[in-house]
Image (cartoon, rainbow, N blue to C red):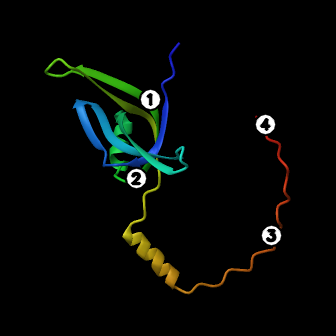
Amino acid sequence: MNNLNSIILEGNLVRDATLAEPVPGFKKCIFSMGVNRFYKNRKNEAVDEVSFFDVETYGRMAEYCSEKAKKGRGVRVVGRLKQDTWKDDNGKTLSRVYVVAEHIEYKPEKKTDAVETVVEKKAETPQTPAPAPEQVKEPVPVEEEAVF
């Protein structure tokens, strides 16, 4: 039986992705992402904690990722952790833990100046008034029972 090795991260890219071909025919894309965590400490003070993770993708996903993964873009990564170990020139053992992405979702890109200009111009043009909204009935409160 395999042990569980699964991770889900959601955050923003801290730099553009880089595409490499370490072996002919094998594509690898590498990027780093920052993930924020907000919580209150024992003194009830708000704390903003940031963690950074290296992510790798392979094959066709790597090619697609190299086009879409740009600095600042929001992503959700589903994958697994992997650890590489090696010895340096002095014989010291070194290691690195990173995420191997199995699925990536890209959040919509931020608006560019050109798009914002078009939106502003449309807002300046006079428009016909919207029809009056129909009377909305307020929802009836329903008591819910909490199950623990």
Q: Nearer the viewer, residue 102 or 40?
A: 40
Query: Foreground mark, 4 or 3?
Result: 4
Query: Foreground mark, 2 or 4?
Result: 4
- 86 relative to 101 in the view: left or right: left
| Disc 2: which residue | 73
**Type of amino acid at the residue the image marks with label 2:** Arg
Distance of mark 2 from mark 4, alpha carbons? 39 Å
Q: Quadrant of the C terminus?
A: top right
Between discs 2 and 4, the one toward the N terminus: 2
Res 136 label: 3
Distance of mark 1 from mark 2, alpha carbons? 21 Å
| Disc 4: which residue | 147
| Disc 1: which residue | 80
Between discs 1 and 2, the one toward the N terminus: 2
Q: Nearer the viewer, residue 40 or 22?
A: 40
**Type of amino acid at the residue the image marks with label 1:** Arg
Q: Quadrant of residue 131?
A: bottom right
**SS at mark 4 in the image:** loop
